[in-house]
Amino acid sequence: MYVAVKGGEKAIDNAHALMRSQRRGDSKVAELSVEQIRQQLPLAVDRVMNEGSVYDPELAALALKQASGDAVEAIFLLRAYRTTLPRFGYSEPLDTENMQIERRISGTFKDLPGGQILGSTYDYTHRLLDFALLAEGEAPSSPAEGSCTEAGELEDSLCELEACPRVLELLNKEGLIEQSRQPGEADETPRDLTREPVNYPAERAVRLQNLIRGDEGFLLSLSYAAMRGYGDSHPFAGEMRTGRVSVELVPEELGFPIEIGEVLVTESEMVNQFHGSKEQPPQFTRGYGLAFGRAERKAMSVALVERALRAGELGEEVLYPTQDQEFVLSHTDCVSANGFVSHLKLPHYVDFQSELEMIRRLRREIDTGESSARQANESSEEDNRR
Amino acid sequence: MSVANQQDPTTQADAQAARQRWMGILAKASSDDLQQQWQALQLEPEYQFIRKPETGLTMLRGRLGGAGQPFNFGEMTLTRCAVRLSSGTLGVSYIAGRDKQHAITAALADALLQEADTATLLQNTLITPLAEKQAAQVQARAAAANSTKVDFFTLVRGED
């Protein structure tokens, strides 16, 4: 039971003032602007957008600044802000196949149509601290930047990317990889967990929505566990792509779709071995992940956990927590998790007092029980001696 | 999307396709670029708000496996606005983000692009330059990405 306390306003005001000055740091050092965070810490911004579940880089950067860089606190701020905004309907499903690709790799197929494009990546770096960044001054810019507009610097062929069809759909001619939909299957309206709570068992669309707004660290660890032996997962990275996709929606007053802008997203498709069931022959199954911004670790973790959670419907034995919907989906949300853990910091004085009383009482009972037992023992020993 | 004849759309479908195109270009333009081009036009149309610019959220949808059933992905901020010119023409905008001025200007441009006497001017001095700039940005990004295109080759291992 939680009993409220009163008072402490002055101390709380001062504590918040102290937090603001600590956040500002040494005033001799220039203040960080929201635009600088947005431009120069984009991966932190992407994480806040993903788990805050709102695509708005400026707001996510603001939240990071306000939260002194604490991702979970920033996510909480963004989630709180989103509740103040009205909802203007749903977008048309994003067409990720027509993404303007800035990075696209496959761990399964060397020669894919459209090619492998490394884009900007930390892969292949040596993870040595770069002390050049510690020195002031401009870092060298990328070689191809703006080259297409400056005539003659780059071949024309470089300015047009080849079409990049989805690898797994394309290589499905043998029927060895499951299809993402059956021929002629009509679209169903997915349930929206921001509008209605998750019911178990949850359908695949709801599970995916939950995972995408879930805590990156939690999902990463779960997918790691699933691969290490707590989930029977033997995945390959079928395809991963990052780039811009167009957002379209159909305003009621117009009745036709219009483009409202673009979002940068990362998409991951994992391929998993599947030994087959009574209904299905052995084949590769797929796990799918999608995330805002450049968020490969997140997209891959979502795809791996997404696949693990399909165990039940694929007829695999559900043996591990990673395959257990209720365990996974009810613990992904960092705002809920943080709230529940953090609430322990609030005064629980009355609560604790009552438990303290109980422990004292139990001790007394044991003590009196022991002493009476001892007395009984002693008297019986005396009896024996007699 | 086809580039329809904007001056004299022969069918309703053409008119709609043309409008979809310019609404997309207006939405994807940076607010600064749009304001700059717009102010250079020195148009001061009379209008009233049918819907003052308001910011809200839309739930983005994706597809399972990229091509399967729709699912709810996450929300995004957007701002919408609707204006009516004194002629009665309605202009509408839905713009990603929270920039109200962007939404107002885009709605006004949408209305004027439907008016016979301003359509050509706006096409030539607003939509075309914005579209060209956007195409150049697409090309620059494509070139940057293409410079990282890789050919992996597998090595024959000695022990095999």
Image (tube, coloured by chain):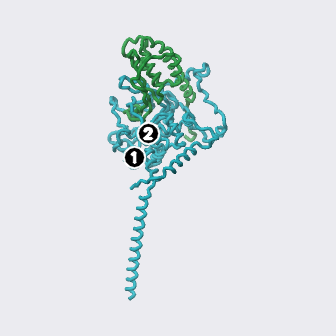
Chain colours: A cyan, B green
Q: Is residue A125 left or right of residue B7?
A: right
Report the residue that reaches farthest toward the bottom: A386
Query: Helix, strand, or loop for circle 1?
Result: loop
Q: Quadrant of residue A42?
A: top right
Residue A59: x, y in percent? 49, 35
Looking at the image, can residue A274 be seen? yes
Q: Is residue A294 above or below residue A226?
A: above
Find disc 2 in the rendering and name its residue.
A212
For mark 1, does the 10 Å Cα neighbourhood hold few (<14), some (14 to 19), or many (20 or more) residues? few
Looking at the image, can residue A98 be seen? no
Residue type beneath disc 2: Ile
For mark 2, does the 10 Å Cα neighbourhood hold few (<14), some (14 to 19), or many (20 or more) residues? many
- Foreground of the two, B112 or A339: B112
Find disc 1 in the rendering and name its residue.
A330
Residue at 64% in and 33% down: A139
Chain label for disc 2: A
| Quadrant position of the C terminus of chain A in the picture | bottom left
- Foreground of the two, A27 or A104: A27
Query: Helix, strand, or loop for circle 2?
Result: helix
- Number of marks: 2
Residue at 51% in and 34% down: A58
Residue A66: x, y in percent? 52, 41
Residue B101: x, y in percent? 48, 25
Q: Earlier in the sequence, mark 2 or mark 1?
A: 2
Residue A348: x, y in percent? 44, 56
Chain label for disc 1: A
Residue type beneath disc 1: Ser
- Foreground of the two, A24 or A371: A24
- Do circles 2 and 1 both sit on a common chain? yes
Q: Which mark is residue B155?
A: none
Alpha carbons under labels 2 and 1: distance apart:
13 Å
